[in-house]
Image (cartoon, helix red, strand yellow):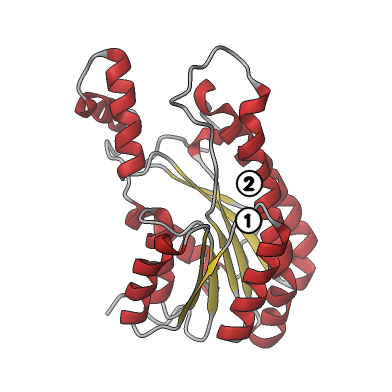
């Protein structure tokens, strides 16, 4: 039995951006803590394996195909979660978009920023807005509700290739601060988890691309990145997910408007 078992008993979480990486790890972490989970992603194929794993834990689970850039889709997700699982106590905004860093890049290109900002800022806020009435009801019913934004190390250490992504997540961080103040009187908490590099297929692909540009081995790139962190480690999705659980759970009942850097010490406040 997990030592977090029971933290979210009787709670329902909505998690966007479900896939084989962070979305899966977060959804499973919340389910192991007792939550029933509504999964959201643009494609059903991304959610089906995760739904099976959650069901195997004995938790209820629903999947809702959702593009968070569409307001109607966000409303449908929130209503489906509440209708089929009974309520919404936790929202984890994990869905994101970034520039295509494979494309040639020649200085500042504002158009590269459009998709990240549409999804990461406006899409995330649309989904949050759709869930707020349900979160307020959860406070009335259970005394606690939480929104967790997944942001990024790039907010503090941006690189030109992903400047639009970094800018969108910085805007989302500021929006989270505003929401923490606006929703505070309703006792709905809003916090951010900011991972650094995350082990997985996407990062491996990125390291391979950098290695090709520099004519070195991908393992050398990975070792260089790890060496920048005091822990000399690159975190896996499963190592980051417990930080999300902390903010989602009553353990953080009096914590709002905060960002927790989960990057092996790469940044320090």
- Image quarter of the N terminus: bottom left
What's the residue at 53%, 81% (across, down)? 11
Q: Residue 188 appears at what percent x and percent y?
A: 69, 69
Q: Is residue 143 left or right of residue 239?
A: right
Q: Residue 158 appears at what percent x and percent y?
A: 53, 27
Instruction: Identify residue for label 1.
Output: 68
Identify the element where label 2 is drawn.
Answer: helix
Name the mark on residue 176: none
Q: Is residue 34 left or right of residue 40?
A: left
- The residue nearer to you, when weighing 105 against 198, is 105
In this picture, is 51 found above or below 117?
below
What's the residue at 52%, 16% (across, down)? 105
The answer to whether residue 170 shows anywhere in this view is no
* Total marks in image: 2
In this picture, is 188 found above or below 34?
above
In this picture, is 67 found above or below 145?
above
What's the residue at 45%, 83% (across, down)? 60
Snapshot quadrant of residue 32: bottom left
Snapshot quadrant of residue 91: bottom right
What's the residue at 35%, 56% (across, down)? 20
Rounded to the nearest angstrom, the CA distance separating label 1 from label 2 is: 7 Å
Q: Residue 231 appears at what percent x and percent y?
A: 29, 39
Mark found first going from the N terminus, 1 or 2: 1
The answer to whether residue 228 shows anywhere in this view is yes
Q: Residues within 10 Å of mark 2 (few under 14, many from 20)?
A: many
Q: Residues within 10 Å of mark 1 (few under 14, many from 20)?
A: many
Q: Residue 95 appears at what percent x and percent y?
A: 54, 53
**Circles 1 and 2: CB atoms closer than 8 Å:** yes
Q: Is residue 81 left or right of residue 159?
A: right
- The residue nearer to you, when weighing 91 against 79, is 79
Identify the element where label 1 is drawn.
Answer: loop
Instruction: Identify residue for label 2.
Output: 119
């Amino acid at each position: 039995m997990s030592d977090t078992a029971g933290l979210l008993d009787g709670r329902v979480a909505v998690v966007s951006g479900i896939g084989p990486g962070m979305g899966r790890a977060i959804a499973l972490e919340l389910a192991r803590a007792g939550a029933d989970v509504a999964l959201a992603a643009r494609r059903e194929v991304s959610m089906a394996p995760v739904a099976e794993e959650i069901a195997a834990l004995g938790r209820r689970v629903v999947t809702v195909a959702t593009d968070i850039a569409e307001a109607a889709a966000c409303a449908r997700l929130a209503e489906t979660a509440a209708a089929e699982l009974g309520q919404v106590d936790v929202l984890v905004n994990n869905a994101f978009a970034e520039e295509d860093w494979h494309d040639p890049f020649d200085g500042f290109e504002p158009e590269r920023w459009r998709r990240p900002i549409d999804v990461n800022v406006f899409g995330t806020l649309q989904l949050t807005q759709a869930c707020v009435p349900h979160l307020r009801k959860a406070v009335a019913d259970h005394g606690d509700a939480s929104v967790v934004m997944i942001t990024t190390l790039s907010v503090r250490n941006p690189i030109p290739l992903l400047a639009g992504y970094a800018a969108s997540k910085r805007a989302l961080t500021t929006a989270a601060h505003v929401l923490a103040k606006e929703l505070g009187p309703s006792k709905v908490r809003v916090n951010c988890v900011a991972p650094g590099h995350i082990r997985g297929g996407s990062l491996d692909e990125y390291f391979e691309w950098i290695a090709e540009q520099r004519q070195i081995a991908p393992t050398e790139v990975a070792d260089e990145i790890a060496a920048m962190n005091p822990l000399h480690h690159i975190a896996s999705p499963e190592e980051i997910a417990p930080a999300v659980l902390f903010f989602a759970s009553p353990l953080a009942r009096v914590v709002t408007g905060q960002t927790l850097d989960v990057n092996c010490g790469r940044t320090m406040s």
